Image (spheres, rainbow, N blue to C red):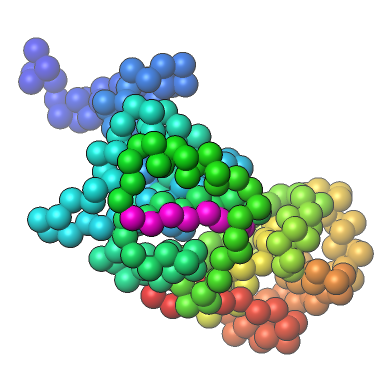
């Protein structure tokens, strides 16, 4: 009987079952009821949705809903209709609330001031938006017309974004991404088989540092790779660990052997980079 199995073995059995379920999910949806994360679900965090959008290359669909106690958003049932549900699965989907001030500030960048509303954000940064109660047919018509090349948002520097570094391990790819975004590259050189990276990661995670550097395209390179050592030489780096900020126009600034977050803050300010991650 299951109840006769020791508690720690039951936990182990459950973990093994969930792991097996996750593997089976690659070829079947049979484990959906076990609570395994589904890409087709609505996300409630615009930061996470933007990261998934960047990772998958898919457009972002935002449902801005009027959700208050005792009041249901009129789009809720319409979005569940088969014709609509079958259409929107291709998007990264994010549900934001009018009652939450950071969400209001975020959607206002896309010209939306009231709920309910739908916003499609494209990979090129442009968007299409529609507000008001809609039928399934009207939603489908909106999505048909919401193709790339829409309006440009009015980005608000005071929209809060959780600072995160999406580290890349290839400088050429990081430079290409930075050029597309019109942003600088942050290159971190660290010695292989050393404590360089744990120490640097702690310094770079300081709020004072992320406010200045989190908007750059970050690239982390180990001295174990010959190409990394060659690139360090091109930037004039002779001592690792080192930070290099490569500007869009081609110039660069170098900080060798950073020992404090204050030194990194001064380095960032002297290099002239500007980030506006916003405040809550």
- Let me know if residue 72 appears in the view: yes
In-image side of 114 versus 182 (left or right): left
**Within the image, what quadrant is residue 81 found in?**
top left
Quadrant for the N terminus, please.
Answer: top left
Q: In the image, which residues are magenta?
A: 125-132
> Which residue corresponds to the image point at 81% horizontal and 52% vertical from the top-left?
172
Q: Main secondary structure of the magenta part?
A: strand
Asked if residue 86 lies in the magenta stretch, the reply is no
Residue 267 can be seen, yes or no: no
Instruction: Identify the residue shown where x is 46% and y is 16%.
Output: 27
The image quadrant that residue 233 belongs to is bottom right
Residue 72 percent coordinates (x, y): 18, 51
Q: Nearer the viewer, residue 39 or 37?
A: 39
Corner quadrant of residue 203: bottom right
Looking at the picture, does residue 86 appear above or below residue 209? above
Q: Is residue 56 left or right of residue 87?
A: right
- On screen, residue 132 above or below 273: above
């Amino acid at each position: 009987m299951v109840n006769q199995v020791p508690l720690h073995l039951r936990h182990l059995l459950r973990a093994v079952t969930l792991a097996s379920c996750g593997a089976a999910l690659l070829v079947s949806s049979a484990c959906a009821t076990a609570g395994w994360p589904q890409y087709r679900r609505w996300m409630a965090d615009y930061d996470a949705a933007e990261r998934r959008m960047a990772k998958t290359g898919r457009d972002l669909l935002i449902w801005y809903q009027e959700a208050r106690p005792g009041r249901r958003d009129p789009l809720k049932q319409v979005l569940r209709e088969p014709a609509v549900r079958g259409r929107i699965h291709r998007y990264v989907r994010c549900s934001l609330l009018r009652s939450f001030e950071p969400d209001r500030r975020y959607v206002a960048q896309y010209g939306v001031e009231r709920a309910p509303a739908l916003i499609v954000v494209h990979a090129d940064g442009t968007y299409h938006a529609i507000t008001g109660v809609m039928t399934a047919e009207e939603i489908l018509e909106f999505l048909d017309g919401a193709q790339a090349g829409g309006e440009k948002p009015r980005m608000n520097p005071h929209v809060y974004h959780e600072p995160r570094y999406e580290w890349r391990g290839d400088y050429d790819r990081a430079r290409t991404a930075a050029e597309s975004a019109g942003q600088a590259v942050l290159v971190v050189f660290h010695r292989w088989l050393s404590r360089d990276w744990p120490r640097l990661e702690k310094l770079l995670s300081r709020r004072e540092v992320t406010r200045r550097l989190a908007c750059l395209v970050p690239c982390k390179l180990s001295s174990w790779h010959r190409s990394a050592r060659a690139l360090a030489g091109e930037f004039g780096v002779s001592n690792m660990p080192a930070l290099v900020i490569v500007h869009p126009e081609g110039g660069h600034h170098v900080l060798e052997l950073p020992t404090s977050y204050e030194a990194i803050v001064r380095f960032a300010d002297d290099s002239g980079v500007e980030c506006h991650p916003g405040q809550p």
